[in-house]
Amino acid sequence: MSKSAYPTGVENHGGFLRIWFVYQGKRVRESLGVPDTPKNRKAAGELRMVIMYRIKTGTFNYEEQFPNSTRSEKTREMITITLKEMCDKFLALKQPTITAITMKNTRARLKTVCLLLGEDRKISTIRQEDVLRLRNELLNGTQFQRMFQPSTKKGRAVSTVNNSIFLLKEVLSFAVRNGYLESNPAEGINPMKKDRNEPDPLTKDEFVRLIEAALHPQIKNLWAFAVYTGLRHGELCALAWEDIDMINGTVKVRRSLTPLGEFCMPKTVSGERVVHLIAPAIEALKSQMAITRMLKPKAVRVSGREYARTEEAELTFVFNSSVTDTNSRSLGNYSVMSINGMWKNIIKRSGVRHRRPYQTRHTYACWSLSAGANPNFIASQMGHRNAQMVYNVYGRWMSENNNDQVDLLNSKLNDFAPSAPHKVFGISKIILTQ
């Protein structure tokens, strides 16, 4: 039988007839389950015309017309699924691939997105202008936003807004890939530009004032060690004497403490590293040994990078909160939040200009660069994969200290500089370097 013998939209499929038609902007095919005969072809063509008419007039019900179709249930779900339901599907499948703290932040930001766009809103009704309006509300802190967070007096930071829109875009892309949406309404919305936070390291005078303002030897040792090693604060909280080799002057960074209080391996392989200690860092550890080295170790569970993988460890924390805590509920290690609170108090007492506590890490990097350390070495000490991060973050700071580099070169290369002949009053004279 020639192809022209079939009515438009009717075709043979394995000896049986099926029809195709356009529904919700997409071509779909449904088998009729009847043999391919001339009489059935004619009836199939007429059925297709009826279906197309009902689609055009808005009276077509896919499930009633094709109750056994695998598409009817999916189509109904596509039409009715809400933004919150889509976010829940996305989060449930995303959970095995991200850490607990990332999961907490992702869930919180998507919750805000759902509140502002409407938890019960059908995702099929979301348009690009809705996403742009959401971005403005997050950025400016409008009255609509404060309906849900009355304490919010202004909008969120650009980085937070970009992250929230990125997560929404991910959810909508997930919906597209799984057939819940025809296209992603957030596609084409680029992140807003954000100013780079420049390093603001402590000066040597400020560092001395900061250490002198500490009221306990352990606090002095903690902040001195933080500046002289560049460790992240979660790594400081999780640091144990079992990680330290005092003979070779090294620290093996094996774990970190999250803001949720969970011990975990460093997020990246490069974060798991050996830090070579300079003399002041070793002196801080020697002072700290008398305070915590002989304390009883604590059994902790450390999460690996692989999902659901954990291991037990007996750790004697270098900086033990029980030494300075006045209550008896101390767990033995400082929390990340307590480190931040400790920093605020010591900054106030020292009179040093306020900075974020992360500036201890910037101070280590800037001081090391000033001393002439190789950026690749600094990157490895700080847990970066390569020196590109060092150049990106400290490039401008490095260029502003070119005079220091010239002085360094003069001091290192002056003895090797060749003498050069000069003519003075027509007589060749050798100018000797001193």
Image (tube, rainbow, N blue to C red):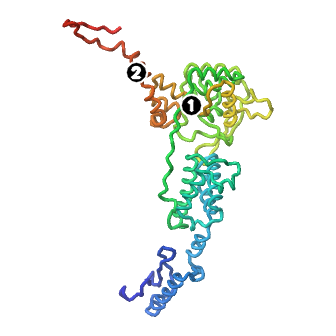
Q: In the rendered structure, which amino acid carries the disc numbered 2?
A: Val
Amino acid beneath label 1:
Arg
Q: Is residue 184 left or right of residue 336?
A: left
Question: Is residue 318 visible to the viewer in this orientation of the structure?
Answer: no
Alpha-carbon distance for marks 1 and 2?
Answer: 25 Å
Q: Is residue 332 visible?
A: yes
Report the disc number at residue 405.
none
User: Quarter holding the C terminus?
Assistant: top left
Looking at the rendered structure, the secondary structure element under dot 2 is helix
Q: Position of residue 200 (x, y in %)?
A: 55, 31
* Image location of residue 418, percent across then percent down: 29, 13
Q: Residue most toward the bottom?
A: 39
Horizontally, residue 26 falls left or right of residue 425, namely right
Q: Which residue is mark 1?
A: 361
Residue identified by numbered label 2: 406
Q: Residues within 10 Å of mark 2 (few under 14, many from 20)?
A: few
Residue 171, quarter of picture: bottom right
- The residue lying at 60 percent from left, 39 percent from top is 265
